[in-house]
Amino acid sequence: MIDQLRKEVDRLQKHHYKGQRLWSFAHHFSTFGAALLSLTVATLSQQDGWDAASFIVSRNTLIAILSLSAAILSALAARGGFERKWIANRLTRSKLDNLRLDMLEDVEDPTPLKEKLKRIISEHDSAIVGSSSQREDDGKG
C-alpha cells in the first residue's frame, strides 16, 4: 500500500507543480498585461504624427481595441481568482513535498500518511473554492 501511496503523491506533486506554473502565468499575464496595454493606450493617445496610411487600422480603432483588451484582462484578473489558485497550488505542492519526505522513512502503518494526504487534498479544494463565508461575500452563498 505504501508504494501506491508514493505513486499517488508523485502524481499529485507533478499535477500541482504544473498548476502552480500555469496559474502563476495566468495571474501575472492578466495583471501586468492589463497594465501594459493601458500604458500603451495612454502613449498612443498622445502621439500626433500617426500616419494612418502606413497602418492596418486607424489610431482610434487601435486605441479602442487595446482599451477593450486591457478591460478584459482586468476583469479576468479580478474575477478569475488566478492569484488564489496559484498560491493554493504552490502551498499544496509544498505540503506534498513534506509528505514525500515523511514517506522516505520505513513505514509500518501507512494509515497516518494516507490521512495526511486526504487532509492535503481537502485543504487544497477549500483554498481553490474559498470558504463558505467568502462565497457569501461574493454573492454566491
Image (cartoon, rainbow, N blue to C red):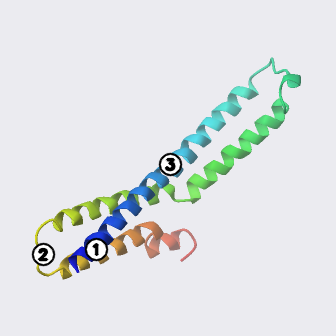
Q: Earlier in the sequence, mark 3 or mark 2?
A: 3
Residue 49 point in image, percent of width and height:
81, 17
Residue placed at 37% from the left, 60% from the top? Answer: 14
The residue sitting at the right extreme is 53
Figure quadrant of residue 48: top right
Query: For the residues carrying marks 1 and 2, which lies nearer the camera in this image?
Result: 2
Residue nearest the observer in this picture, 127 or 14:
14
Say which amino acid is labelled 2. Answer: Val
Query: Which numbered marker is on residue 140?
Result: none
Cβ atoms at labels 1 and 2 below 8 Å apart: no
Q: Is residue 49 left or right of residue 134?
A: right
Tell me the SS state at disc 1.
helix
Query: Which numbered marker is on residue 25?
Result: 3
Say which amino acid is labelled 1. Answer: Leu
User: Is 55 situated above or below 9?
Assistant: above
Q: Residues within 10 Å of mark 2 (few under 14, many from 20)?
A: few
Say which amino acid is labelled 3. Answer: Phe
Query: For the residues carrying marks 3 and 2, which lies nearer the camera in this image?
Result: 2
Q: Residues within 10 Å of mark 3 (few under 14, many from 20)?
A: some
Residue nearest the observer in this picture, 79 or 20:
20
User: Is 75 situated above or below 31?
Assistant: below
Tell me the SS state at disc 3.
helix
What residue is disc 2 on?
Answer: 107
Residue nearest the observer in this picture, 103 or 36:
103
Residue placed at 52% from the left, 74% from the top? Answer: 136
Cβ atoms at labels 3 and 2 below 8 Å apart: no
Query: Which numbered marker is on residue 117?
Result: 1
Figure quadrant of residue 7: bottom left
Residue 75 point in image, percent of width and height:
63, 54
